Amino acid sequence: MILYHGSFVEVAAPDLLHSRPNVDFGLGFYTTPIREQAVNWCIKFKRQKKDGILSKYTFNENAFDSVKVLNFDSYSMEWLDFVVDCRIGNDTTDYDIVIGGVANDKVFNTIELYFDNLIDKAEAINRLRYEKPNLQICFRSQAVIDKYLHFDGSEKV
C-alpha cells in the first residue's frame, strides 16, 4: 500500500519523537493513502510561507496480521470517544496502528460543540455522518514504523 505524509520537511526516517501529543489518534506518525489529502496538508504549510513536502512510503500490509490495529470504518460514537480521549490526553490503549477518519476543521467544530456540552453524543454523530470521511493511518509504534513502513522519496508541492 502506498501512503503519504504532508509536511514542510522531507520525512525519510519517521519517528515518534517528533510527534505531537493530544491529536486525533494520539501520539504517532500520521499518513494517508489519499494523495490529495496529504497535498492539502502541505498547502497549510505553504500558507505559513514554508515549503510543502510530500513524503511517500510503501507500507507492508502483512503488518495487519501481526500488530494491534484499531480500525474505524466510519465516524461513530466509538470513534468520537477515542478522538476525545486522545485529544484530552486520556488515551491508555496500546494500539500499534489506528485507522479512521480525520477530525478536520468541520469535524473539529462538531467535537468542540460536544466538548462544551452544547450538543450530545448522538447529535455529534448525526452531524459527522454528513462529512466526507478522509482517511488517516496513525503509526503509534516505532518498531512497526521501522519494520513495515519504507520511505520511497519526496517531492515539493
Image (tube, grey):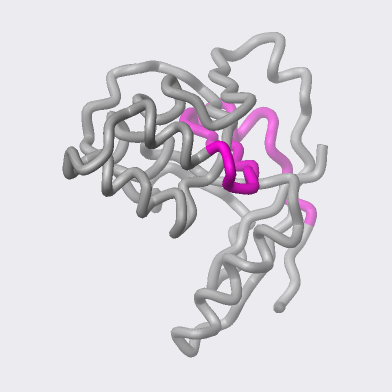
Q: Does 143 appear above or below 36?
A: above
Identify the image quadrant of residue 54: bottom right
Q: Does 43 appear above or below 118?
A: below
Residue shown at the point (57%, 17%) measured from the top left: 69
Identify the image quadrant of residue 62: top right
Quadrant where the N terminus sits is top right
Label count reads 0
Residue 16 horizontal/vertical position (percent): 42, 42
Residue shown at the point (38%, 36%) measured from the top left: 124
Please report the bounds of the magenta region as a residue range: 129-152
In the image, taking residue 65 as reference, residue 31 lies left or right, namely: left
Residue 108 horizontal/vertical position (percent): 38, 51
In the image, taking residue 58 as reference, residue 126 lies left or right, namely: left
Residue shown at the point (59%, 22%) measured from the top left: 71
Between 15 and 88, which is closer to the camera in this rendering? Answer: 88
Residue 17 horizontal/vertical position (percent): 37, 46
Between 72 and 62, which is closer to the camera in this rendering? Answer: 72
Instruction: Identify the residue at the far bottom of this view.
Output: 49
Identify the image quadrant of residue 59: top right
Between 27 and 9, which is closer to the camera in this rendering? Answer: 27
Quadrant where the C terminus sits is bottom right
Between 153 and 90, which is closer to the camera in this rendering? Answer: 90
Specify whether residue 88 is painted magenta: no
Instruction: Identify the residue at the far top of this view.
Output: 65
Instruction: Identify the residue at the far left of this view.
Output: 116
Specify whether residue 131 is painted magenta: yes
Q: Does 106 appear above or below 22?
A: below
Residue shown at the point (63%, 55%) measured from the top left: 5
Residue 86 horizontal/vertical position (percent): 31, 34
